[in-house]
């Protein structure tokens, strides 16, 4: 039995959207995609240009936000898997995902890493304004 047939509306899943990974609930089945309502962040999206990953010398170095709590997004069925376990608090999971990405960027010691960390610091301030 394929993954598509096993999943249904209401299931808790992981899904990869662009370069981020999330835990969410399937709210609609849209033929080749599921509409997923975000409940937690497992991996924060990479910063910069998606078409030129890990490159700093691009026309515009994008700030990539994580999907918000309860935001809904279409995720290709091939990128959605059943989630087992307890769903972490959204903001706790977001904080851990940012910290993990910052640690990875610290290892790089590159212009891309420095630019990414600056974007992430600004995002972190915005995400947690009034929460810390």
Image: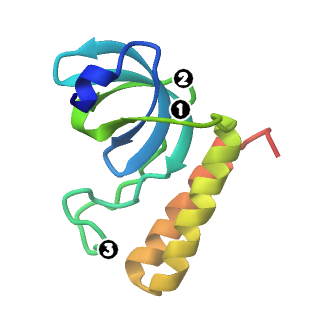
Residue 102 lies, with reference to residue 85, above or below; the image says below
Q: Distance between the residues labelled 1 and 2?
A: 6 Å
82 sits to left or right of 84: left
Is there any visible trace of residue 126 in the rendered image?
A: no
Q: For the point 67% across and 38% down, which residue is it? A: 88
Q: For the point 61% across and 46% down, which residue is it? A: 94
Residue 73 lies, with reference to residue 116, above or below; the image says above
User: Which residue is label 1 attached to?
Assistant: 68
User: Which residue is label 3 attached to?
Assistant: 56
Q: How far apart are marks 3 and 2 (CA)?
A: 32 Å
User: Which residue is label 2 attached to?
Assistant: 70
**SS type, badge 3:** loop
Q: Which residue lies furthest to the right in this view?
A: 132
Q: Residue furthest front?
A: 1
> Are dots 1 and 2 in contact, CB under 8 Å?
yes
Which of the marked residues, 3 or 2, is nearer the chain's N terminus? 3
Instruction: Give neighbour class at mark 2: few <14, some 14-19, many 20+ (Cα, 10 Å).
Output: some
**SS type, badge 2:** loop
Closer to us: 50 or 23 = 23
Q: For the point 48% across and 43% down, which residue is it? A: 66
Front: mark 1 or 3: 1
Instruction: Give neighbour class at mark 1: few <14, some 14-19, many 20+ (Cα, 10 Å).
Output: some
Q: How far apart are marks 1 and 3 (CA)?
A: 26 Å
């Amino acid at each position: 039995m394929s993954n598509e047939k096993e999943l249904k509306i209401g299931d808790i899943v992981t899904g990869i959207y662009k370069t981020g990974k999330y835990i969410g609930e399937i709210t609609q089945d849209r033929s080749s995609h599921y509409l997923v309502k975000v409940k937690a962040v497992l991996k924060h999206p990479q910063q910069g240009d998606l078409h030129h990953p890990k490159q700093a010398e691009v026309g515009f170095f994008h700030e990539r936000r994580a999907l918000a709590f309860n935001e809904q997004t279409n995720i290709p069925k091939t990128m959605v898997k059943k989630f087992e376990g307890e769903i972490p608090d959204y903001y706790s999971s977001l904080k851990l995902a940012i910290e993990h990405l910052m640690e990875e960027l610290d290892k790089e010691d590159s212009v891309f890493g420095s630019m990414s960390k600056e974007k992430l610091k600004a995002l972190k301030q915005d995400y947690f304004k009034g929460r810390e």
